[in-house]
Image (tube, rainbow, N blue to C red):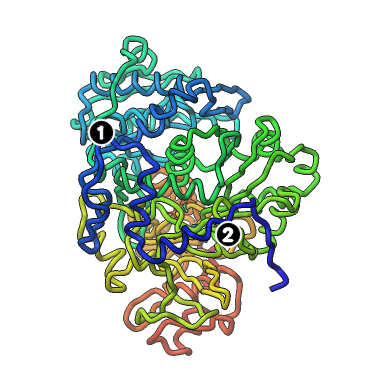
Amino acid sequence: MSDTYKIGLGNNDTDIRKKADSDFVSFWNDQAKNLTWFSPWKKTLDWQPPFARWFVGGTINASYNALDVHQETKSQKPAILWEGEDGDSRILTYGQILTEVQKFSNVLKSLGVEKGDRVTLYLPMIPELPIAMLACARIGATHTVIFSGFSATSIRDRVDDSKSKLIVTADGGYRRGKIVKLKEVVDEAIKGFDFVKNVVIVERTNNEITMTSKDRLWNDLMNNASDSCPAEKLDSAHPLYILYTSGTTGKPKGVLHGTGGYLTHLYSTFKWAFDIKDSDVFFCTADIGWVTGHSYVVYAPLLHGATQIMYEGAPDFPDASRMWDILQKYKATIFYTTPTALRMFMKFGDDIPNSFDLSTLRLLGSVGEPINPEVWRWYYKTIGKEKCPIIDTWWQTETGGMLISPLPGLETIPLKPGSGTRPIPGVNITVVDENGKDVEPNTKGYLVVKNPWPGMLLTLWGDDEKYKTVYWSKYENCYYPGDYALKDSDGYLWLLGRADDVLKVAGHRIGTAELESCIVSHDDVAESAVCGIPDEVKGEVIIAFVVLKESVTTENKILEKELVEKIRTDIGAIATPKQIYFVSKLPKTRSGKIMRRLLKAIGNNEKIGDVSTLEDGAAVTEVQAAFDEIQKSIKESN
Ligand code: WT7
């Protein structure tokens, strides 16, 4: 108990928890009233497990709530303080963004995009990305943003799955001083896709592009567009976006989010967790290509009429002081980043942040992966100067917004480094064993959510069955997120990493099955298994074991290069393994299951004796033999 920190921001609303505990449906009913609706809902929750529809019968628009509602009081207020990697900067007010969004809404309409159509956005972190998202939302088109680090094949799969009519991209984006040629990637990705009617290109580098008959330039279209486009009155469950994310099987799944419930969840969590005030300058470092960027860069801050910093480039470019420089320059008050970024900053040493004025900061956040207690303490001391609460926020692409976090905007409770503390009000979360029974305090189990919540995904795009099996089949009427957790004797939750074959590399979610099938599709590969091993900065990194076909004579060094190249073109650079081991066989149980624990031990250079619980069915001698053989073949081949 000595390692706890009682630090709050003077808020203490005890009623809200009481209300939420007594009736979560009427609690969320009250929360939804914070938004502006065109017509009220008739039913707060329609729960046909596992499908939840919130605020049934109500009509609403995300773009209207993000922009129009602020015009009377905040049209001159900066919404986005944009900083380019090369030092370029732009300030966009709420008034300006509304104008741009209305224009782009009209552009979309003029190109035949209608309510219900999908639009793919493959853009760098530039203001045109939120503008395009909000324009889609305004006319009722469903946006599907693809992280600009993904490859042509990844885009192709996603565009094909969503059947997007239109794609918005840029001639390039900046990353570590280099230009990433996004439009070329799109050309490759949509070859032969007749359903893609137009590609809109934002020109912002001097990179030359070749125009095709589908291509239109953003500026040309915007110059001719009217700046008035009233927001569509959309059903509360209208699909706002699809965001693809990796799971345990097959290709990435399209997580589908609605409008009214999702916005309610974001509005409330942003207020409770970040204690947002009109005077704040908020900075979330997430790329909009991930859910953190959708929820806490685009929608939540704009719903609150907040001012935020948006940064395009790498966090350590041109040098290790970039983040602190940005925080100081814009006088940021709230900073929200990842444990991976913090571990990197910590390695650079305290002198760097200490040479900047970070005194405007009042609240710090962490997201995406477990935060090590020593990193938490460093963040608290060196960045927050022991005066800022740290919120460790647990959630997922599927949950839409935070489900577990300290909430300094609502209450003061002692913080413990490495714990997300408690669930948000109105969400019932517990830790259970394999049979769904609550575990004793301080016992590791599976995290489950026992009731629907407003930010919950509607379904998986085009695959209700998969939605049921992935999230709702392990435990009856409970949402299963796939995380290990424990609850301590104070009722605090500690998130202990993924319980499935999903990896978290630098906070990015990577499915082992997807990566394995990519490797196996190389002509020379017979079998493959990948797993994660701990890494000081990235949390975990990928290692791959590859069994080649018997006839293969190509040198391993060449094959290794080819495989890395293949992974980069099929998935993207984030899925690149740190090490590829060529082995003669993979360790399997009698039932044919790959023993990843053993592979992890090998990757970590551990002795077999350190592998505590081996999967069922394998005799120790067999395992020992497989282990020795793999180590031998690694020695011979690498
Ligand atoms: C997975 C979801 C949270 C939005 C961005 C990532 C892990 C996330 C935490 C945290 C421990 C965390 C979980 C979760 N995770 N936040 N604060 N502490 N683990 O969304 O890519 O859908 O990944 O990230 O394993 O299931 P995502």
Q: Which mark is residue 140?
A: 1
The residue that label 2 is drawn on is 539
Q: Look at 22% across and 52% down and name the residue there.
A: 43
Q: Does 82 appear above or below 251? A: above
Compared across the picture, whether 46 is left or right of 241 comes to left
Q: Is residue 19 above or below residue 575?
A: below
Residue 194 lies, in percent from the top left, at 18, 30
The label on residue 8 is none
Amino acid type of the residue tagged 1 in the rendering: Gly
Q: CA distance from mark 2 to mark 1?
A: 39 Å
> Looking at the image, which is closer to me, 193 or 56?
56
Residue at the (56%, 22%) spot, across then down: 90
Q: Mark 2 packing: few (<14 Cα in 10 Å), some, or many (20+)?
A: many
The reply to whether residue 238 is visible in this rendering is: no
Q: What is the secondary structure assignment of the residue under circle 2?
A: strand
Q: Position of residue 280 (x, y in %)?
A: 60, 36
Q: Who is closer to the viewer here, 243 or 509?
A: 243
Give the quarter of the image for residue 300: top left
Considering every residue shown, the one lying at the far front of the view is: 15
